[in-house]
Amino acid sequence: MMDKPDIPKDDDWRHRFFALDALDSVDPIWSDLVELWDSKRGDALLPAWSSFDMYDFKPWLGYVAVNKVTYEPLDTLTTLWGTELTELYGEDRTGRTLRESQVDWSITLKDWTFWERVADQPCIGHAEGNIYWKSRDYIHLTRIFLPFGQDGRTCDTIASATKQVDP
């Protein structure tokens, strides 16, 4: 279990998890992306991030974030934050860690547990909710989180894609 920092109150985001072999259970809005991710796994548990080219993500460009995962304690470093995400969230998160974001993004215990589960189990994560902490609660988002591992087993990268949807 990771060392958790001071945690603010919980929020109304809904988190779901899917086994890596339960791709049909994932919301159809993400089926093309999840199928792309799965196509690069081969016999491995996780695909390597290096197996992908940014052109693979063309339909989602601007809405993709890439986070490098570190352990003991668990944290992530955002190495890519799409331009459309900057518009939605009102800031560029490139170069920021999850721990650095805990106050200004109201990171909750539920959020820490979500990231921990996607990285440690690993599994596919889905999150949906409003950007209440930026006074943008009128913006409702759905996000998919996909784990990657250079060795095919240990999650070292989590990529996510975001879409604005009606609540």
Image (cartoon, grey):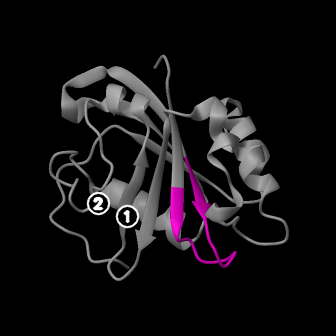
Q: Secondary structure at mark 2?
A: loop
Disc 2 residue crowd, few under 14, some 14–19, many 20+, Cα 10 Å: some
Q: Residue furthest right?
A: 43
Q: Nearer the viewer, residue 18 or 157?
A: 157
Can you give x and y, in whole percent of width and height, for residue 157 in the image?
Answer: 52, 64
Identity of the amino acid at label 2? Thr
* Residue annotated with mark 1: 76
Q: Secondary structure at mark 1?
A: strand
Q: Nearer the viewer, residue 135 or 157?
A: 157
Magenta stretch: includes residue 117: no
- Looking at marks 2 and 1 on the same chain, the residue that comes earlier in the sequence is marked by 1
Can you give x and y, in whole percent of width and height, for residue 78 in the image?
Answer: 38, 55
Disc 1 residue crowd, few under 14, some 14–19, many 20+, Cα 10 Å: many
Identity of the amino acid at label 1? Thr
Q: Residue at x 19, y 25 (%)?
A: 135
Quick check: 24 left or right of 46? right
Q: Which residues are magenta?
A: 145-158
Can you give x and y, in whole percent of width and height, for residue 126 in the image?
Answer: 54, 45
* Residue annotated with mark 2: 97
